[in-house]
Image (cartoon, rainbow, N blue to C red):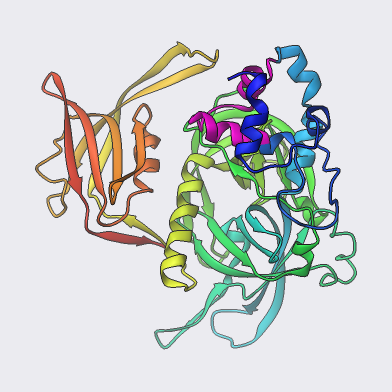
Amino acid sequence: MKKRNLKSIIAAAGLALTLGISAAFGGCSALNARDGVDGKDLNIYDIYAAAKAESGNPNMTFTEFLREYLSYNPDEIENAVTLQTSINNSLLSSVSILAQFEEYVNSYSDITNTASYSGSGVIIDIDRENGDMTVVTNCHVVYSAKAYRERFNQVVSDGYSDSVYLWLYGSESVYENTYKENAISATLIAASKTYDVAVLKVTGSDMVKRSQARAASWSTAEEVYLGETVYAIGNANSQKLSANVGYISKDLEEINVDLGTTASSDVYKYSVMRTSAAINSGNSGGGLFNLGSEIVGLVNAKSKSDNVGFGYALTAASTRRVVKSMLDNYAATNTEVHYVNRVLHGITVEVTDMYSSGLNDKGFAEIYEQVKIKGADYRYEASGKLSGGDVLKHIKITRGGVVVEDLDITREHNFYDAMLSARAGDTVEFTVYSNGSDKTVSVTFNNYEKAY
């Protein structure tokens, strides 16, 4: 596909054709700048999303789109789409968050104090006509261990905020004095401390109806690479939305975060990427975006030392699947849930070899990990079908005849990420290298567990 087919792509997406490409690159929304009606304002990111859908290549990068569809060379791409354009687009997909809690003075007292904590979030779905939107943030933004209360083996307070407020970009200027002036009330519909993810729902908001807020898209890439330019947008130091630019400095590592109090530890381990973008208190739950304004990570922590200039973000590869699971569960139950359903598969894996396979076709240094089956618990369906020592090469998940995952396993995290998409009743095909040849094993899983 080249530039000559661009209009057909836009038309197929149902977007207006009246805005020229030059205006789109400038990030302009010249039409209906205050009406809040979807489909009448067009910019380059809408065209990018349509091109990915039309091509059947969800992993197409923004730079590849510009080069392939618009015939831009690297210098023209740099001039046409600036980092500033991308940041301003993502500002319209970001929110500041304030969560209020009634925290108990101590474990033995019924006396509470009102506490407020700031954070950030990303809009992942919006219906401006009806004033509805869905926002993703960190669980720890809307949870306080001090607000949790259990007496006589009964939970008095679950620790989650019942008073959550959001501010869109540009509407934050008054909330330092009268914080509810432009506040949008949000309802917590799902959360999990295990994954540090929470989902908020807004319904019927007049602020949303007359806004130019827009939903951000998840990056569908399974891997990130060092050196990629990224930017974090969030409510840093509770001073309203701002942007900090950096790059991905480490693709994957594990960190421990204590969500408890000084009196009671509650430590969780998270798989994250490291970024050189400055992360401060209040950035939690905000997006880490790439040049195409896609969410590559969800900011959730910063380095403990003030002398170390980096922060951490949950990977999009994991988080987008967790959010999908949460939304599916909420749609099925219409009830606020504080866990993620995940298939109880009983499979353990281990990395038995890892190395760089050199530069890939994009010029990025690729890491390969040999992932072997360590064991399959005898109590579950994979027992007797997968054996210790089998090299895991591919996973395909089918639900009702529809393929929901079709993924090569080249890193250990690919296995865990893919299995987040599995539901009880799904059929999972594992392709493994065993006894000198490849074989495919089909397993239907019927049990699930709750990851709180």
- Is 188 located above or below residue 367 in the figure? below
Residue at 62% across, 32% down: 9
Would residue 115 be seen by someone viewing this image from the given angle?
Answer: yes
Would residue 443 be found to the left or right of residue 229 on screen? left
Residue at 65% across, 57% down: 126
Q: Would you say residue 55 sits in the magenta stretch? A: yes
Would residue 268 be found to the left or right of residue 248 on screen? left
Q: How many marks?
A: 0
Would residue 48 be found to the left or right of residue 402 on screen? right
Magenta stretch, residue numbers: 47-71
- Is 302 located above or below residue 372 in the figure? below
Would residue 310 be seen by someone viewing this image from the given angle?
Answer: no
Q: In the image, residue 399 lies at what x, y percent? A: 30, 50
Q: In the image, residue 202 lies at what x, y percent? A: 65, 67
Would residue 320 be found to the left or right of residue 354 on screen? right
Residue at 28% across, 47% down: 401
